[in-house]
Image (spheres, grey):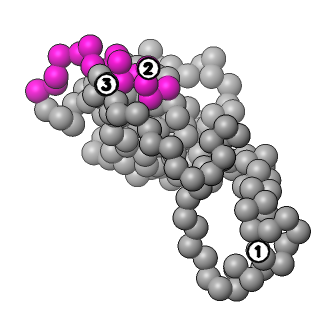
């Protein structure tokens, strides 16, 4: 999972969770807890960093760890289990195929817009033009988003744009 960490509204670290956690551990603790926030770059959700220097080792569970297979519980309705049982290869193989197919399709525009909304709700919810900027994101209008977020702190504005429009040209991303 890749994260972006903000200190008082400015991005200070991006990358894998372990990498950004080491950057954050090296910082002096901020005066207010909400001055230092971390967000998942895929979902836009705020996340808690594990800042312990020595994280406990992960317990091995059921499954085939050598193959990367991990056993977890899945809750389905009886008709779902019946359908899965009737599929060639059984429930596990069918579920793996369905997940792989969904991963190949990738994330759609709505997923990106939702991620931007989650991030911006926390970081820009009180800023002028927030509602208008979000409407422009869901309309797929990057120019409109830029217009309504123009006065926002650059780190917040740019990260919101990156989440909402990840495939757009990033060469003209700043309004210095």
The answer to whether residue 16 is left or right of residue 95 is left
Which quadrant of the figure contains the C terminus? Answer: top left
Marked residue nearer the N-terminal end (3 or 1) = 3
Residue 86, position as x, y percentages in the image: 83, 78
Residue 162 is labelled as none
Residue 166 vs residue 140, the one in the foreground: 166
| Vertical side of 158 occupied by 74: above or below | below
Please give the range of residues in magenta.
16-31
Of residue 69 and residue 78, the one placed in the foreground of this image is: 69
Instruction: Please state the horizontal and vertical placement of residue 43, each as a whole percent of the image.
Output: 51, 45
What is the count of numbered marks?
A: 3
Q: Which residue shows up at 67% across the image and 37% down it?
A: 66
Look at mark 3 in the image and give the residue it sits on: 54
Distance, label 2 to label 1, CA atoms, is 40 Å
Which label lies toward us, 3 or 2?
3
- Crowding at mark 2 (Cα within 10 Å: few <14, some 14-19, many 20+): few
Q: Name the residue beneath numbered marker 2.
A: 19
Residue indicated by mark 1? 84
Which residue is at 45% across, 42% downward?
A: 59
Q: Nearer the viewer, residue 72 or 100?
A: 72
Residue 11: within the magenta?
Answer: no
Q: Secondary structure at mark 3?
A: loop
| Badge 2 vs badge 1, beta-carbon distance below 8 Å | no
Could you tell me how far apart the alpha carbons at marks 3 and 1 are, in whole angstroms?
Answer: 41 Å
Instruction: Please name the residue shown 62% across and 51% down the image.
Output: 63
Q: Nearer the viewer, mark 2 or mark 1?
A: 1
Local SS, label 2: helix
Task: Estimate the spatial distance between the alpha carbons at disc 3 and disc 2, rounded to whole Å.
Answer: 14 Å
* Mark 3 vs 2, N-terminal side: 2
């Amino acid at each position: 999972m890749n994260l972006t960490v903000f200190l008082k509204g400015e991005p200070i670290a991006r990358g894998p969770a372990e990498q950004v956690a080491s950057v954050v551990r090296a910082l002096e603790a901020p005066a207010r807890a909400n001055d230092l926030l971390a967000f998942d770059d895929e979902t836009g959700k705020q996340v808690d960093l594990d800042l312990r220097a020595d994280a406990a080792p992960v317990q091995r569970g059921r499954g085939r760890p050598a193959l990367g297979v991990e056993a977890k519980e899945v809750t389905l309705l009886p008709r779902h289990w019946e359908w899965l049982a009737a599929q060639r290869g059984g429930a596990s193989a069918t579920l793996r195929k369905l997940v792989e197919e969904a991963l190949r399709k990738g994330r759609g525009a709505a997923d990106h817009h939702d991620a931007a909304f989650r991030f911006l709700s926390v970081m820009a919810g009180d800023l002028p033009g927030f509602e208008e900027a979000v409407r422009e994101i869901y309309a797929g209008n990057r120019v409109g988003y830029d217009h309504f977020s123009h006065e926002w702190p650059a780190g917040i504005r740019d990260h919101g744009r990156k989440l909402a429009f990840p495939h757009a040209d990033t060469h003209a991303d700043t309004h210095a």
